[in-house]
Image (spheres, helix red, strand yellow):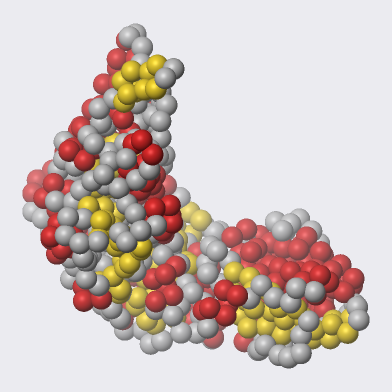
Amino acid sequence: MTASLGPESLSAGPLTASEQEKIRADFPILCRTVRDGRPLVYLDSGATSQRPRQVLDAERAFLEQHNAAVHRGAHQLAEEATDAYESARARIAAFVGVQPGEVVFTKNATEGINLVAYALSNCSVGQELVARFALAAGDEIVVTEMEHHANLVPWQELCRRTGATLRWYQVTDDGRLDLDSLEVSERTRLVAFTHQSNVMGTVPPVAELVRRAREVGALTVLDACQSVPHTPVDFAALDVDFAVFSGHKMLGPSGVGVLYGRRELLEVIPPFLTGGSMIELVKMEGSTYAPPPQRFEAGVPMTSQAVGLGAAVDYLSAVGMDRIAAHERALTDRALAGLSEMEGLRIIGPPDTTDRGGAVSFVLHDVHAHDAGQVLDDLGIAVRVGHHCAWPLHRRFGIAATVRASFALYNTPAEVDALLAGVHEVRRFFWG
Amino acid sequence: MKLEQMYQEIILDHYRNPHRSGLREPFDAESYQVNPTCGDEVTLRVALDGDRVTDVSYDAVGCSISQAATSVLTDLVVGHTVAESRSTMDAFVEMVQSRGQVEPDEDVLADAVAFVGVSRYPSRVKCALLGWMAFKDALGRAATGSSANGSRRAEEQ
């Protein structure tokens, strides 16, 4: 159940042509055609990635052989299902450098961020008041202008509920985080930021942001949706308090995401969703709760999806995250070089691959992103068009929508070239 | 190539040379509409004389489909009664939502029949309807005497 590539994978360079071929053969969907027989060129992995047979097989094998409700019942299937679920948790935890008890399964990354926001909300009201985390008027939550709505709206809502104020780091013209645009203070209680912009690929200076937050005693929340699938990530080394990522963006199933929480924090924050599975003792008068991570997993969890995500991290690990990062960097380099030569095309984000991942967004001065996307689609090239759930970032650049190509380990240099040729065709189609 | 079925020459003509674009006075009602999935927006004004549409003016940021559909809209409704305009609107909405199943009536829709190809691309239907939704909303406002919902627009400017 691995994608071991043999001796070639020992070097940490980009994937070789034969390795790429071998990987692509694991993804059935990449063989299909679209729009009148065009081979699919899938450049939308930033929205959702495709899944290899190994992940599909793991889900199917679980459902055909071991399916049962986990953490309940004493029959053999219940034991096997629980073992499969917890084994997936342990492998996923190791994949991001943390302990299994620090990994909470959620529906998706959005739910993970909401879990933290509502836990802090619950710290701020009623009998659950946890003074250390309570938020009130005068407190500040800090985000950045480049956040996905998922790492912005929950904090706006937390501010609304508690009276705290939202502040944000701004973005420079070349798509970097402007560290001079904001100073955290003793009033800053939490700093939430992306590990890699889903629009521009920008990787902000995590160590510096964490250092500043620590200095004033603020919690840190890292949105790692766009980093974990593409580069080696170690949350313990990054020293963040919380982090989230999504299964479906990293070759895994939809319906499963991960919240990492530093153990000592998960032990003291109150739950978000409550109900079955997450309890210790229930009486009519009131209840006590299980230790983490179970405290944050109310109800029967997604199980085959967690098992599938376990298989996805096995697959990624077998290829090697350093190899994947090198491969995607080469693709990004190629795309940036080709696009930056085109007249009337503006890349939104850093112009080179320094501290930058494989999301490349651009606008054409004379063709709207939707129309460009439609022509590319007609050529079989799947890209994302719109604001990519980062509307404030687009507003900051004075644009309504961009075209985004985003890469994954299964993309090839030939596909980047198809994109570049496609952009030329866009121009020809609309303006001759 | 299916692409030409959607981007018919009439649509591209309206996109390159939109009719009646720009915001004008006087007007009886204004509507601001936004497509949340792509961020495209339109501010559209309707001027009436009794039950007759005398002008439709607009300021729009959007793709060729939304721009052209708004341009065509003005051709179809200016000079017509509110009732005729609503009936044209219903025919247009029915056509673009039909997934290619409705044969449009050229007598009713004129240039707008070109948008039948859009109906085969479900993700673009909202683009074709953005201006029409603003028109519908503005007519409603004109009838109830509430002139605009444009506060968000004003903030952005």
Q: Relative to residue B68, is residue A42 drawn left or right?
A: left
Whether A116 is drawn above or below B148: the answer is: above
Residue B96: image quadrant is bottom right
Is residue A272 visible in the rendered structure shown here?
yes
- The answer to whether residue B96 is left or right of residue A90 is right
- Give the percent coordinates (x, y) of residue A144: 31, 66
> Relative to the observer, which residue lies in front, A67 or A36?
A67
User: Measured from the top left, where is residue A326 in percent x and y?
Assistant: 17, 60
The residue furthest bottom is B25
For image coordinates 26% across by 44% down, the residue present is A131
Viewport quadrant of the N terminus of chain B = bottom right
Determine which quarter of the picture holds residue A270. top left
A285 relative to A42, above or below? above
> Viewed as shown, does residue B18 lie left or right of A240?
right
- Write down the quadrant of residue A139 in the picture: bottom left
Q: Residue furthest top?
A: A75
Residue A166 point in image, percent of width and height:
35, 63
Give the residue drawn at x 39%, y 78%: A397
Front-most of A397 and A50?
A397
Total label count? 0
Residue A1, above or below A157 = above
Residue B149 coordinates in the image, percent (x, y): 66, 72
- Whether residue A147 can be seen here: no
Residue at figure coordinates x 37%, y 81% from the top left: A346
Give me the residue at 30% from left, 73% from top. Answer: A170
